[in-house]
Each structure stands twice: as C-alpha cells, then as structure tokens.
C-alpha cells in the first residue's frame, strides 16, 4: 500500500538508488520519485548528460558501490563507457530489487514541512498526466542531482547569434558537425572532450574553443606521485588518476607539507606540472606553476594530442560582439560559426523546497562550490528529518554511499546526530570553504579520503587503523609461518618440525602415527 511508505527520496540517479537501498537495509520503507521514465540520472542515455563516446573520468574502482563490484567483462579496461555505467546502475537496481520502490514520471514540485513538524513532510508531485498528488512522509532525502539545469549563456550579443545553439548536456556525437564551423565555450571537462572530438571526428569542421583560463589537462592514467625531492616521475608505475590521488599515502604526503593553503596549492601545482608534461611542451597550453594561486584541472586523453595537430583554435579572450554568425574577439580575432555549443556549468536548483528552508540552508543556485550549507553536506540542525545525498560538487559513488548509509541509520534511530553546537561548527567550516578568496578551490572537498573518513566516523564505520596495522602485521607473519610449515611438510613427508627461539625442535605433525 502507498500509505505504508515512510521516506520519500527525490531522484533515481546513483545517489537516489544507493539511498533507497540503504534505507531498505535499515528497515525503512522508501518510495523514490523520478521525473523521467527510467533510472540513471546523468547516466540515463536518453535524458542524462552523456555522449556516445564518453568514458568516465575515474576508474571502475571509484564508480561503483562497495557491496556491488563490477563484474568482469562488463566494463572497458579501467574506465567504463557511459553505456556501461548506465548498465551497472540498472544491474544494481535489479539486484537489490529497487525498481519496485520507484515511481517513474513523477516530478516533485513541492516539499513542505507539516504544520506540526512531528508529522513530517508533505511531498507534492506531478504525474505524466499532469495530475498533482500530495503525500505525507516522516522523512525526505533530496538526491535529485546537481547537473540538471545548464547555466544561461553569458556572451555579449548572444541574442544576435543566428546559428545553431546547443548545450553540452545535449551533445551526442560529431556527426552533425561535418563541414561545420563550431564555437565551443567553456573550460570544463566536457568542453575539452567535445572540442577535441569534433575537431578529430567531423571531417571539414573548424573548431574554436573559448576558455576563461587554462586548466591542467590530465590523462586518466597517471604516474603515481613520489615524495618531495624526487625530480621526475617517468619511471613510476601507471595507475588510474583516482588511485593516485584518492589514497592515504597521497593524503599523508600532502598533509606533511608546511605552510598552509597557499603552500598546499603550490605543491600540487608543482606536481601537476610534472604529470601534465605533454601539455607543458606546447606554449599555447603551457601553465606556469610558480604564478598560480589556485588549482584548476580537467581530464582529457585526447585534447592535447588533437590540439597539437592544429585542428583546434584556442582563444583565452572574451567575445566583444556577435552579429549573425560573425564573432569578434577582444584581440581582434574574427570567426564565422555555424554552431555554438555552451559548456559553462549548471545552476544548482532546488525549486521544490520552500523559501524558509532554502534561506536556513543559505541556498545560492549560482554558487559553484557549495550551493547549500549543511553539516557534512548532509544535514541541517533545524531539519533533522531532511537529508541530502550528492549535493556538493563531484560527489562520487563511495561518498554517496556513506552519506546514504548515515542518513538511513539516523532515520532508523540507530545513530544520533551530533549536538546543534557541533553541527553549527561543521557548517562554519563549509562557509570558510565557500567564501575562501586566498586560494579558490575547484572542488569543496577534493580530498576524498578525508571526507570519506569524516562521514564514516559519524556512524561508527571508521576502522581503528592502529589496530588494523597490528592485525595486518600479524596476518603477514602467519602467512610467512604457514609457508615455512608447508615447505617443511613437503621436504620431510614423515614429520614436520620447527625450531623455536630456544633452539628446541618441536614435532608438529608425525605421519608415522
């Protein structure tokens, strides 16, 4: 019965699916509202933000949930394709029997706290027929995703452009751009990938790429960083970039650097200067790590190579006028463009939340780093029955899973939230990240080891690493001892002996008896 559901989850992308699964594991009864006719969120091939040739930026190790590893043969090398990632989510939903808890073609239009907060929340949703319905829930989880509403174009004279306009979210492949002149705007991951693909795969195309600033262009497979003082990395083993950066060794190395935020950025820029060596060989793409005050990166295995062929014209100056299809730039460059592709980010919208809730969370849809201020990006002390999953920039699968598990345990009364004072202190830390002006971070929580540990600690899932080290040391010793014993058995079939520290020979097995 519908009335039996007690938790509403908004969105059936990765964050909504893992939330549904965790709530079920905690004995709760969720219903997931999904505005489209299928799961997947950004990975949905029909309504998401992927294109035909896209492969994920991070390896399959990071793009999965802990209790459902990728099966051999279901992904391409280290980095699954968009289609494979979508199939993984479909398989995950089927394996844990989540689909029966999802209400498709149901767009949430309003989430309003009941007049008596003890009674929970009223969720209003619009069905495909246009009919609106309202249902009461004890708790609500917002897992609607951040990449739904592309930013409006911010180009001088944009309204005067008469060519074809699209956004990166709608790009599928290079076929429509054969023999076309194309302007790609943006310095995001997708803009570099799309510009390179059109330039290389659309015969007769001409591509102008407009950026505000040059990022470090990283390959998906990187050399593993070495400690300070090592001059180069060429001989280091190759790993997926997430295994290089998202580990305790890398975190400890960075934490050991003295000098605070500025020194941290300087060290990382110096490291990226070595990692992005092919980019640094081209003067147009070159970055001077000594003058950088912030970190800015993107991932592309093809952009530098394609740019070196001369097929992309890169402009770092603003547009000063557009007339029809004719672009004029600040440096005097002109270009006639048949097509304009905007890849300039997203507005992070929460239109279904009432203004008092938005105001309490300091909601700002234009803030790229932190559009809302929450404790650990999950809870607000004024609304303990409202949780958020995946609502800070670049929340990957393991972090979503930890957020969802924490919410489910809190909602099931198995774990208590910290005091209001502690939560307010945590929110102040988020404000410091949001308002930082000295070294502006690209992502609010780029150290995924730290943010993961911080979340795990909230519900008792963080291991005692000192005890773990002792356990591992003991296990290694036992493994070595087992090998010694096995060799003895093989060498002396009738008995197995071992000499202790007092040089006493002990018979452990005697096959004569």
Image (cartoon, helix red, strand yellow):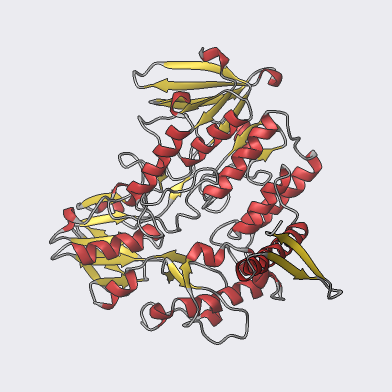
Q: Outermost residue toward the right?
A: 502
Q: How many marks overall?
A: 0
The image position of residue 327, as x and y in percent, is: 25, 63
Residue lying at 39% horizontally and 37% vertically, measured from the top left: 90
Give the x, y percent position of residue 424. Answer: 75, 44
Seen in the picture, residue 142 relative to 373 is either above or below; the reply is above
Residue drawn at (72%, 42%) of the image: 459
**Left or right: where does residue 182 sit relative to residue 203?**
right
Indicate whether 431 appears above or below 358. Answer: below
Q: Nearer the viewer, residue 490 or 219?
A: 490
Q: Position of residue 205 (x, y in %)?
A: 17, 64
111 over 214 or under it: above or below:
above
Q: Residue furthest front?
A: 512
For residue 448, which quarter of the picture?
Answer: bottom right
Give the residue drawn at x 41%, y 43%. 88
**Residue 359 falls in image quadrant:** top right
State whether residue 379 is above or below residue 447.
Answer: above
Q: Is residue 198 visible?
A: yes
Counting from the top left corner in percent of width and height, residue 294 is at 56, 69
Can the viewer see residue 43 in this picture? no
61 on left or right of 412: left
Residue closest to the eye, 165 or 301: 301
Nearest the camera: 367 or 389?
389
Q: In which quadrant of the rendered image does the C terminus lie?
A: bottom right
Instruction: Locate residue 445 relative to residue 285 in the image: left or right.
Output: right
């Amino acid at each position: 019965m519908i009335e039996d559901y007690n938790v509403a989850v908004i969105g059936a992308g990765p964050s909504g699916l893992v939330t549904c699964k965790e709530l079920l594991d905690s004995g709760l009864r969720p219903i997931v509202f999904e505005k489209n006719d299928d799961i997947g969120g950004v990975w949905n091939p029909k309504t998401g933000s992927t294109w035909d040739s896209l492969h994920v930026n991070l390896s399959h190790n990071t793009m999965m949930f802990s209790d459902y590893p990728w099966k051999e043969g279901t992904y391409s090398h280290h980095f699954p394709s968009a289609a494979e990632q979508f199939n993984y989510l479909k398989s995950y939903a089927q394996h844990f029997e989540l689909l029966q808890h999802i209400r498709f073609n149901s767009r949430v239009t309003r989430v309003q706290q009941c007049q008596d907060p003890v009674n929970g929340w009223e969720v209003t949703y619009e069905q495909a027929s246009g009919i609106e319905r309202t249902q009461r829930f004890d708790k609500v989880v917002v897992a609607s995703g951040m990449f739904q509403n592309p930013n409006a174009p911010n180009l001088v004279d944009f309204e005067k452009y008469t060519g074809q306009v699209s956004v990166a979210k709608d790009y599928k492949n290079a076929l429509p751009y054969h023999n076309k002149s194309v302007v790609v705007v943006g310095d995001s991951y997708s803009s570099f990938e799309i510009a390179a693909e059109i330039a290389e795969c659309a015969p007769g195309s001409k591509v102008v790429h407009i950026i505000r600033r040059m990022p470090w262009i990283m390959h998906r497979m990187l050399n593993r960083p070495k400690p300070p003082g090592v001059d180069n990395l060429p001989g280091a083993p190759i790993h997926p970039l997430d295994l290089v950066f998202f580990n305790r060794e890398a975190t400890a190395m960075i934490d050991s650097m003295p000098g605070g935020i500025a020194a941290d950025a300087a060290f990382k820029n110096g490291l990226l200067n070595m990692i992005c060596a092919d980019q640094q060989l081209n003067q147009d793409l070159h970055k001077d790590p000594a003058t950088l005050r912030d970190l800015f990166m993107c991932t592309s295995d093809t952009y530098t190579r394609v740019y070196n062929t001369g097929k992309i014209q890169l402009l770092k100056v603003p547009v000063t006028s557009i007339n029809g299809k004719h672009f004029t730039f600040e440096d005097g460059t002109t270009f006639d463009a048949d097509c304009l592709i905007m890849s300039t980010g997203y507005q992070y919208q929460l239109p279904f939340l009432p203004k008092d809730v938005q105001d309490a969370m300091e909601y700002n849809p234009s803030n790229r780093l932190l559009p809302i201020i929450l404790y650990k990006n999950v809870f607000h002390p004024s609304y303990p029955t409202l949780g958020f999953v995946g609502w800070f920039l670049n929340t990957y699968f393991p972090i979503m899973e930890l957020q969802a598990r924490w919410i489910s345990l809190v909602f099931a009364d198995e774990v208590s939230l910290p005091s209001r004072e502690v939560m307010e202190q945590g929110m102040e830390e988020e404000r410091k990240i949001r308002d930082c002006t000295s070294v502006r971070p690209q992502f609010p929580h780029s150290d995924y080891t730290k943010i993961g540990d911080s979340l795990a600690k909230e519900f008792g899932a963080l291991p005692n690493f000192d005890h773990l080290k002792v356990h591992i040391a003991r296990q290694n010793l036992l493994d070595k001892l087992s090998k010694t014993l096995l060799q003895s058995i093989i060498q002396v079939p009738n008995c197995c002996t071992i000499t202790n520290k007092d040089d006493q020979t002990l018979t452990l097995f005697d096959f004569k008896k």
